[in-house]
Image (cartoon, rainbow, N blue to C red):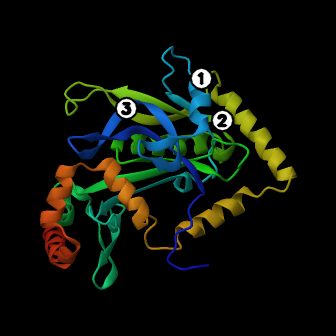
Amino acid sequence: MIKGLAITPPVLGRISIGKIVEKNGKRLPEKDDQFTITSQIQNKDGWVKHPLDEQLRAKAPNQNQKLRTIPVRMIFNDPELNLRAEYSLFDRQTGRLICSGNGETCQRLTNQGVEHHPCPSPDLCSLAQGGLCKPYGRLYMNLDESDEFGTFIFRTTGFNSIRTLAARLRYYIAASGGLLSCLPLQLTLRGKSTTQSYRTPIYYVDLTLREDIHLQEAIQTAKEINQKSKLCGFNQEALDHVARQGYGNACFEVGGEEGLEIVEEFYTEDSKSEHQQTHDLTHVQDIQKGLQQSVQALN
Protein backbone atom coordinates (compact mmCIF):
# COMPACT_ATOMS: atom_id res chain seq x y z
CA MET A 1 0.00 0.00 0.00
CA ILE A 2 1.26 3.49 -0.88
CA LYS A 3 1.98 5.33 2.37
CA GLY A 4 0.68 8.87 2.62
CA LEU A 5 -2.39 8.14 0.50
CA ALA A 6 -5.66 8.13 2.43
CA ILE A 7 -7.95 5.31 1.28
CA THR A 8 -11.47 6.72 1.45
CA PRO A 9 -14.77 5.19 0.28
CA PRO A 10 -15.19 5.20 -3.53
CA VAL A 11 -17.32 8.22 -4.51
CA LEU A 12 -19.90 7.91 -7.30
CA GLY A 13 -21.39 11.37 -6.92
CA ARG A 14 -22.08 14.36 -4.69
CA ILE A 15 -25.05 15.59 -2.65
CA SER A 16 -25.24 19.34 -2.07
CA ILE A 17 -27.60 22.04 -0.81
CA GLY A 18 -26.02 24.81 -2.83
CA LYS A 19 -24.16 25.61 -6.01
CA ILE A 20 -21.53 27.89 -7.50
CA VAL A 21 -22.88 30.90 -9.40
CA GLU A 22 -21.10 33.61 -11.37
CA LYS A 23 -21.71 37.20 -10.23
CA ASN A 24 -19.82 40.21 -11.57
CA GLY A 25 -17.21 37.93 -13.06
CA LYS A 26 -16.65 36.02 -9.82
CA ARG A 27 -17.61 32.44 -8.96
CA LEU A 28 -19.38 32.48 -5.59
CA PRO A 29 -21.14 29.84 -3.44
CA GLU A 30 -24.94 30.15 -3.22
CA LYS A 31 -27.14 28.24 -0.77
CA ASP A 32 -30.27 26.37 -1.86
CA ASP A 33 -33.44 25.04 -0.20
CA GLN A 34 -33.22 21.56 -1.71
CA PHE A 35 -30.80 18.72 -2.38
CA THR A 36 -29.05 18.26 -5.70
CA ILE A 37 -27.38 14.98 -6.64
CA THR A 38 -24.57 15.36 -9.15
CA SER A 39 -22.04 13.14 -10.86
CA GLN A 40 -18.30 13.77 -10.63
CA ILE A 41 -18.22 15.46 -14.03
CA GLN A 42 -18.32 19.20 -14.64
CA ASN A 43 -19.09 21.22 -17.76
CA LYS A 44 -19.28 24.98 -18.41
CA ASP A 45 -22.58 25.13 -16.50
CA GLY A 46 -21.26 23.36 -13.40
CA TRP A 47 -21.65 19.84 -12.05
CA VAL A 48 -23.61 17.45 -14.26
CA LYS A 49 -26.63 15.99 -12.46
CA HIS A 50 -26.61 12.29 -11.66
CA PRO A 51 -29.50 10.21 -13.11
CA LEU A 52 -30.63 9.50 -9.53
CA ASP A 53 -31.44 13.20 -9.11
CA GLU A 54 -34.20 13.09 -11.71
CA GLN A 55 -35.48 9.71 -10.50
CA LEU A 56 -35.83 10.82 -6.88
CA ARG A 57 -37.13 14.26 -7.82
CA ALA A 58 -40.00 12.64 -9.75
CA LYS A 59 -41.04 10.90 -6.51
CA ALA A 60 -40.86 14.07 -4.40
CA PRO A 61 -44.08 14.63 -2.42
CA ASN A 62 -44.17 18.39 -3.02
CA GLN A 63 -45.70 19.71 -6.22
CA ASN A 64 -42.65 21.72 -7.29
CA GLN A 65 -40.55 18.52 -7.11
CA LYS A 66 -38.00 19.97 -4.72
CA LEU A 67 -35.77 17.18 -3.46
CA ARG A 68 -35.78 17.42 0.33
CA THR A 69 -35.44 13.76 1.34
CA ILE A 70 -33.09 11.11 -0.05
CA PRO A 71 -33.20 7.40 0.96
CA VAL A 72 -29.72 6.30 2.06
CA ARG A 73 -27.86 3.46 3.72
CA MET A 74 -24.70 3.68 5.79
CA ILE A 75 -21.85 1.45 4.67
CA PHE A 76 -20.19 1.16 8.07
CA ASN A 77 -21.45 0.50 11.58
CA ASP A 78 -18.92 2.84 13.19
CA PRO A 79 -20.39 6.39 13.00
CA GLU A 80 -16.93 7.97 12.65
CA LEU A 81 -16.28 5.96 9.48
CA ASN A 82 -19.44 7.32 7.85
CA LEU A 83 -19.06 10.91 9.05
CA ARG A 84 -15.60 12.47 8.97
CA ALA A 85 -15.24 15.91 10.57
CA GLU A 86 -12.33 18.09 11.66
CA TYR A 87 -11.39 21.73 12.01
CA SER A 88 -9.67 22.47 8.71
CA LEU A 89 -7.64 25.38 7.39
CA PHE A 90 -6.92 25.50 3.66
CA ASP A 91 -4.53 27.60 1.61
CA ARG A 92 -7.04 29.55 -0.50
CA GLN A 93 -4.76 29.72 -3.55
CA THR A 94 -3.58 26.12 -3.82
CA GLY A 95 -6.37 24.26 -2.00
CA ARG A 96 -3.74 22.54 0.13
CA LEU A 97 -4.82 21.59 3.63
CA ILE A 98 -2.50 23.41 6.05
CA CYS A 99 -3.92 22.39 9.42
CA SER A 100 -6.40 19.76 10.60
CA GLY A 101 -7.48 19.37 14.24
CA ASN A 102 -10.11 17.85 16.49
CA GLY A 103 -10.25 20.50 19.24
CA GLU A 104 -7.49 18.84 21.28
CA THR A 105 -4.60 18.17 18.89
CA CYS A 106 -3.87 19.10 15.30
CA GLN A 107 -1.53 18.20 12.46
CA ARG A 108 -0.01 21.19 10.68
CA LEU A 109 1.94 21.43 7.45
CA THR A 110 5.10 23.55 7.80
CA ASN A 111 8.32 24.02 5.86
CA GLN A 112 9.80 21.28 8.05
CA GLY A 113 7.01 18.82 7.29
CA VAL A 114 3.91 17.81 9.27
CA GLU A 115 4.05 18.82 12.94
CA HIS A 116 1.75 18.06 15.86
CA HIS A 117 0.38 20.90 17.99
CA PRO A 118 -2.42 21.58 20.51
CA CYS A 119 -5.75 22.47 18.89
CA PRO A 120 -7.51 25.07 21.08
CA SER A 121 -10.40 25.40 18.53
CA PRO A 122 -10.66 28.20 15.92
CA ASP A 123 -11.80 30.83 18.44
CA LEU A 124 -8.56 30.55 20.44
CA CYS A 125 -6.10 29.78 17.63
CA SER A 126 -4.07 32.67 16.19
CA LEU A 127 -3.62 30.81 12.91
CA ALA A 128 -7.40 30.57 12.52
CA GLN A 129 -8.35 34.20 13.13
CA GLY A 130 -10.67 35.86 10.63
CA GLY A 131 -12.75 32.76 9.97
CA LEU A 132 -9.91 31.02 8.17
CA CYS A 133 -10.43 27.70 9.95
CA LYS A 134 -13.80 25.96 9.72
CA PRO A 135 -15.28 22.61 10.65
CA TYR A 136 -15.26 20.44 7.56
CA GLY A 137 -17.52 17.37 7.48
CA ARG A 138 -17.98 14.59 4.93
CA LEU A 139 -20.84 12.12 5.13
CA TYR A 140 -20.45 9.01 2.95
CA MET A 141 -23.69 7.22 2.02
CA ASN A 142 -24.85 4.48 -0.32
CA LEU A 143 -27.70 5.41 -2.70
CA ASP A 144 -27.18 2.90 -5.48
CA GLU A 145 -27.72 -0.61 -4.15
CA SER A 146 -26.22 -2.12 -7.31
CA ASP A 147 -22.83 -0.92 -5.99
CA GLU A 148 -22.63 -1.94 -2.34
CA PHE A 149 -19.45 0.01 -1.58
CA GLY A 150 -20.01 3.00 -3.86
CA THR A 151 -20.89 6.20 -2.03
CA PHE A 152 -22.30 9.67 -2.55
CA ILE A 153 -20.65 12.33 -0.46
CA PHE A 154 -22.28 15.27 1.30
CA ARG A 155 -19.73 17.93 2.26
CA THR A 156 -20.40 20.77 4.69
CA THR A 157 -18.73 23.40 6.84
CA GLY A 158 -21.91 24.00 8.83
CA PHE A 159 -22.01 23.29 12.56
CA ASN A 160 -25.76 22.57 12.40
CA SER A 161 -25.39 19.75 9.88
CA ILE A 162 -22.26 18.26 11.46
CA ARG A 163 -23.69 18.33 15.00
CA THR A 164 -27.06 16.89 13.94
CA LEU A 165 -25.58 14.12 11.77
CA ALA A 166 -23.09 13.13 14.48
CA ALA A 167 -25.86 12.90 17.07
CA ARG A 168 -28.19 10.87 14.85
CA LEU A 169 -25.51 8.36 13.87
CA ARG A 170 -24.59 7.75 17.50
CA TYR A 171 -28.20 7.47 18.63
CA TYR A 172 -29.10 5.02 15.88
CA ILE A 173 -26.13 2.72 16.46
CA ALA A 174 -26.87 2.68 20.19
CA ALA A 175 -30.59 2.05 19.76
CA SER A 176 -30.08 -0.69 17.16
CA GLY A 177 -27.43 -2.58 19.08
CA GLY A 178 -24.66 -1.74 16.63
CA LEU A 179 -26.57 -2.33 13.38
CA LEU A 180 -26.22 1.14 11.87
CA SER A 181 -25.38 -0.16 8.39
CA CYS A 182 -28.59 -2.19 8.26
CA LEU A 183 -31.04 0.60 9.12
CA PRO A 184 -33.34 2.15 6.46
CA LEU A 185 -32.38 5.82 6.69
CA GLN A 186 -32.89 9.03 4.74
CA LEU A 187 -31.28 12.44 4.47
CA THR A 188 -33.75 15.16 5.43
CA LEU A 189 -33.35 18.86 4.74
CA ARG A 190 -34.46 21.11 7.58
CA GLY A 191 -34.63 24.87 7.96
CA LYS A 192 -34.44 27.25 10.90
CA SER A 193 -34.02 30.95 11.57
CA THR A 194 -31.51 32.51 13.94
CA THR A 195 -30.46 35.96 15.05
CA GLN A 196 -27.30 35.65 12.98
CA SER A 197 -29.34 34.78 9.87
CA TYR A 198 -31.47 37.93 10.41
CA ARG A 199 -34.56 35.69 10.74
CA THR A 200 -34.19 34.32 7.22
CA PRO A 201 -34.21 30.51 6.93
CA ILE A 202 -30.92 28.63 6.89
CA TYR A 203 -30.90 25.00 5.85
CA TYR A 204 -29.06 22.06 7.36
CA VAL A 205 -29.06 18.28 6.90
CA ASP A 206 -30.57 15.72 9.26
CA LEU A 207 -30.56 11.92 9.18
CA THR A 208 -33.82 10.14 10.01
CA LEU A 209 -35.62 6.88 9.46
CA ARG A 210 -37.42 6.60 6.14
CA GLU A 211 -41.01 7.77 5.82
CA ASP A 212 -43.65 5.76 7.72
CA ILE A 213 -41.07 3.47 9.37
CA HIS A 214 -41.05 3.37 13.17
CA LEU A 215 -37.89 2.70 15.17
CA GLN A 216 -39.03 -0.71 16.41
CA GLU A 217 -39.82 -1.80 12.87
CA ALA A 218 -36.51 -0.46 11.59
CA ILE A 219 -34.55 -2.35 14.26
CA GLN A 220 -36.37 -5.59 13.47
CA THR A 221 -35.60 -5.13 9.77
CA ALA A 222 -31.96 -4.40 10.58
CA LYS A 223 -31.70 -7.62 12.62
CA GLU A 224 -33.10 -9.65 9.72
CA ILE A 225 -30.71 -8.04 7.23
CA ASN A 226 -27.77 -8.60 9.56
CA GLN A 227 -28.66 -12.26 10.05
CA LYS A 228 -28.99 -12.90 6.30
CA SER A 229 -25.69 -11.16 5.63
CA LYS A 230 -23.86 -13.29 8.19
CA LEU A 231 -25.32 -16.47 6.70
CA CYS A 232 -23.89 -15.40 3.34
CA GLY A 233 -20.47 -14.85 4.91
CA PHE A 234 -20.50 -11.05 4.91
CA ASN A 235 -18.16 -9.65 7.59
CA GLN A 236 -19.14 -6.12 8.63
CA GLU A 237 -16.55 -5.92 11.40
CA ALA A 238 -13.75 -6.69 8.95
CA LEU A 239 -15.10 -4.05 6.55
CA ASP A 240 -15.08 -1.40 9.29
CA HIS A 241 -11.56 -2.42 10.28
CA VAL A 242 -10.22 -2.09 6.72
CA ALA A 243 -11.92 1.30 6.30
CA ARG A 244 -10.37 2.54 9.55
CA GLN A 245 -6.92 1.49 8.35
CA GLY A 246 -7.48 3.27 5.04
CA TYR A 247 -8.35 6.56 6.68
CA GLY A 248 -5.23 6.33 8.83
CA ASN A 249 -2.87 5.66 5.94
CA ALA A 250 -2.09 9.38 5.54
CA CYS A 251 -1.61 12.45 7.74
CA PHE A 252 -4.34 14.31 5.86
CA GLU A 253 -7.42 12.78 4.22
CA VAL A 254 -8.05 15.72 1.91
CA GLY A 255 -5.87 16.14 -1.18
CA GLY A 256 -5.10 19.26 -3.20
CA GLU A 257 -7.66 18.61 -5.91
CA GLU A 258 -10.49 18.19 -3.41
CA GLY A 259 -9.16 21.18 -1.47
CA LEU A 260 -9.61 23.49 -4.45
CA GLU A 261 -13.23 22.38 -4.77
CA ILE A 262 -13.80 22.99 -1.06
CA VAL A 263 -12.30 26.49 -1.20
CA GLU A 264 -14.53 27.41 -4.14
CA GLU A 265 -17.65 25.87 -2.61
CA PHE A 266 -17.42 27.15 0.97
CA TYR A 267 -15.29 30.29 0.99
CA THR A 268 -15.99 33.75 -0.47
CA GLU A 269 -13.59 35.92 -2.43
CA ASP A 270 -13.30 38.32 0.52
CA SER A 271 -11.90 35.60 2.77
CA LYS A 272 -9.48 34.57 0.02
CA SER A 273 -8.08 38.08 -0.17
CA GLU A 274 -7.63 38.25 3.60
CA HIS A 275 -5.85 34.93 3.58
CA GLN A 276 -3.53 35.97 0.78
CA GLN A 277 -2.56 39.13 2.63
CA THR A 278 -1.90 37.74 6.10
CA HIS A 279 -1.77 33.94 6.08
CA ASP A 280 0.43 32.82 3.24
CA LEU A 281 1.94 29.38 3.78
CA THR A 282 5.46 30.84 4.06
CA HIS A 283 4.41 32.66 7.24
CA VAL A 284 3.13 29.60 9.07
CA GLN A 285 6.21 29.35 11.31
CA ASP A 286 5.78 32.91 12.59
CA ILE A 287 2.11 32.29 13.30
CA GLN A 288 2.98 29.09 15.14
CA LYS A 289 5.06 31.05 17.62
CA GLY A 290 2.06 33.22 18.40
CA LEU A 291 -0.08 30.12 18.88
CA GLN A 292 2.41 28.59 21.28
CA GLN A 293 2.49 31.81 23.29
CA SER A 294 -1.32 31.85 23.41
CA VAL A 295 -1.43 28.25 24.64
CA GLN A 296 1.18 29.00 27.31
CA ALA A 297 -0.83 32.02 28.45
CA LEU A 298 -3.97 29.87 28.75
CA ASN A 299 -2.08 27.36 30.87
First-in-chain label (1 vs 3): 3
Quarter of image, res 58: top right
The x, y position of residue 274, in whole percent, is 14, 58
Nearest the camera: 269 or 142?
269
Give the residue type at disc 2: Pro
First-in-chain label (3 vs 2): 3
Image quadrant containing the C terminus = bottom left
Residue 91's place in the image compared with 181, above or below, is below
Give the residue type at disc 3: Asp
- Kindly report which numbered mark, 2 or 1, lies closer to the viewer in this rendering: 1
Image quadrant containing the N terminus = bottom right
Q: Give the residue number, with chain letter if any, for mark 1.
A: 58
Residue 232's place in the image compared with 286, above or below, is above
The disc at residue 32 is: 3
Residue at image coords 48%, 17%: 64
Residue at image coords 64%, 60%: 240
State how far apart marks 2 and 1 are (Cα).
Answer: 20 Å
Give the residue type at disc 1: Ala
Quarter of image, res 160: top left
Q: Give the residue number, with chain letter if any, for mark 2.
A: 184
First-in-chain label (2 vs 1): 1
